[in-house]
Amino acid sequence: MWCLRCGTRDPGSMEVCTKCSNELAPQDNKTGYFSQMMRLTGQLLNGTYTLEEYEKTIQWATEAMDDMSKGLEPMEMQMKSMGLNEMAMNMMNRPLSSFKEGIKTFHEGLEQLRFYVYEQNQGHLRNGLMLLEKANNLFNYTADTANYIIKDIKKELTEDQIAQVEKDVQNSSAKFKPKK
């Protein structure tokens, strides 16, 4: 997760960024980036956050979405190498497609918010935040669906295959963690 207020890529495991004390969201909350954008938009509207800071926030959120998108490719490669049957692959492609749609929708929402930086029309904020909420709902749907599907797919795998997949997921996610 990124802190969208200061751009820190590893803001700590607490509910606030260890660098700037920005409220990130509780770790069990499924609204991380969405809630940060809502909060920072509120700060923009009440004058405690500048347009320049907000534009940086939009850029950091865009980069965070790009990072999430880059993380999908190794996951797709891993799925293909697992030797899942056609039905299992189709089941896994559904949440993956929803996640990609969520990233695309989040990008669209960020573009709407960026329009506000150049033309202070609150309609841009309203439209952007509605798109971010839609994207957040897609992310939550994806997570819930994937967890359900993974339970079903695990029934078809041996213990060794499950251990290998978990090891591969840990290794691939470590590649995307920022170096300190």
Image (tube, grey):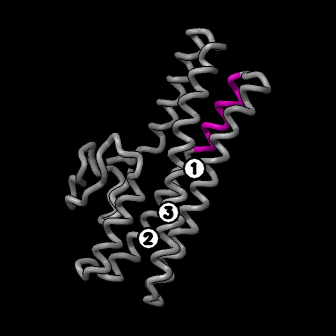
Whether tag 2 and tag 3 are in contact, CB under 8 A, the answer is: no
- Per the image, the residue denoted by label 2 is 58
Answer with mark 2 or mark 3, whichever residue precedes in sequence.
Answer: 2
* Residue beneath the point at 54% across and 57% down: 135
In depth, the one of 99 and 38 nearer the eye is 38
The answer to which image quadrant residue 84 occupies is top right
- Residue at the image point whose x is 53% and y is 48% from the top: 139
Left or right, residue 58 beside residue 160: left
Q: What segment is highlighted magenta in the picture?
A: 72-82
Q: Earlier in the sequence, mark 1 or mark 3?
A: 1
Q: Position of residue 124 (x, y in %)?
A: 50, 80
Q: Mark 2, mark 3: which one is toward the viewer?
A: 3
Image coordinates for residue 103, horizontal then vertical, percent = 57, 56
* Mark number displayed over residue 70: 1
Looking at the picture, which amino acid does disc 2 mark? Ile
Q: Position of residue 7 (x, y in %)?
A: 34, 62
